[in-house]
Image (tube, rainbow, N blue to C red):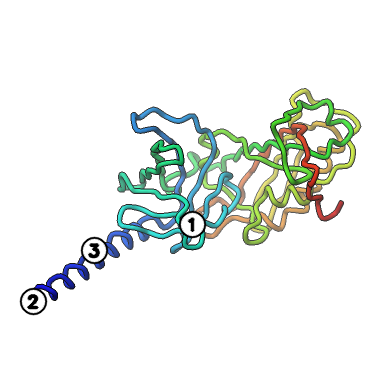
Amino acid sequence: MKAKHSILTVLLSIVSLWGVSQSLKDYLQGEWLNYKVTLDDGRAIHSDLYARYIFRGGNLFVSNTPIDKGIFQSIKYTKDGMQFLDGYRVTQEFRVETLGGDSVVLATTNEFGTTLHYYFVNQKVIKDITDTPKKRVYEFTVAVFDQATGFNKLKRDVSLNSIHTNEIFTSAKKSVDMFLPPPAFRQDEGKNFATYFNTEFILKKAVDIDSTDNRVVIEFVVHKRGISDIRIVNKVNYEISGHLFLLLEKSGKFWELPKERHLPSTIPVRLEFVFIAGVKNPDAINPKNQ
């Protein structure tokens, strides 16, 4: 009788554990935006990077830019939270601290033994403030490693190093605009806008630099058929600005208004590219067209 009781206890524990993790899995489905990171004592960590977690069934997509779907992450739900997996190996664990309404707080301990608390809000509660579609502003820092003529005048950052000829990094600070429901850039599974840019941006020379802040600003409109009304707002020089214009024009078929988001029929977007001369790895991988 005692053995049967023990087996029953184990079975009840398993059912209870499944119920907790299944409930968490169901609750987390959708898009969650990270808006704050703190230490145990409540001090905020200086983190201005955009981060979005998209839960789809048992899968997770983590994105550091609003316009991308994100990088796939295999996860396993547990009694207290979830685990990031690399095959069968656990690479990071998150435990749920608070859960309710449209917010969740997850905690994780890093390799140095420091516990970090991540605060998330559900994307669905963030909507345009007015009926007029709000312009989304996304800023990217582009490190140019091929040292084309003219880039010598740009600010040099020797700490940058890449296996690519070019590299694109997100550097937009968190703002209301960053959290508004965005359009999406989807070329192929696993390929985001940075991947597309790194492949397509090929510039062999630039005669001069006529912008003191090395910043190219481009505006366009995203709609159901792609993009239109591309306009150069601020240029670095003819070669760079023109090349970016053609690159975005070519990328038009990869932009979309996701069906799962309730978005206006047109979304105005403003992309800001800041160019920095970097250091190319001697074993750099050249773009496909070069």
The one nearer the camera, 212 or 161, is: 161
Q: In screen coordinates, is 186 left or right of 259?
A: right
Q: How crowded is mark 3: few (under 14 residues within 10 Å), some or many (20 or more)?
A: few
The one nearer the camera, 87 or 228, is: 87
Query: Pointer 1: what residue?
Result: 60
Q: Nearer the viewer, mark 2 or mark 3?
A: 2
Q: Quadrant of residue 119?
A: top left
Q: Where is residue 180 in the image (x, y as percent from the top left)?
A: 52, 43
Amino acid of disc 1: Leu
Q: Nearer the viewer, mark 1 or mark 3?
A: 3
Q: Position of residue 3 (x, y in %)?
A: 13, 74
Q: Residue 16 carries which label?
A: 3
Q: In screen coordinates, is 96 left or right of 204?
A: left
Secondary element at image label 3: helix
Among the two numbered marks 1 and 2 on one chain, the one whose residue lies closer to the N terminus:
2
Q: Which of marks 1 and 2 is in front?
A: 2
Identified at 77% across, 50% down, the residue is: 249
Q: How many marks?
A: 3
Q: Position of residue 142 (x, y in %)?
A: 72, 38
Q: Quadrant of the N terminus?
A: bottom left
The one nearer the camera, 53 or 41, is: 41
The residue at the far left in this view is 1
Query: Pointer 2: what residue?
Result: 1
The one nearer the camera, 183 or 171, is: 171
CA–CA distance in space, label 1 to label 3: 24 Å
Among the two numbered marks 2 and 3 on one chain, the one whose residue lies closer to the N terminus:
2
Amino acid of disc 2: Met
Among the two numbered marks 1 and 3 on one chain, the one whose residue lies closer to the N terminus:
3
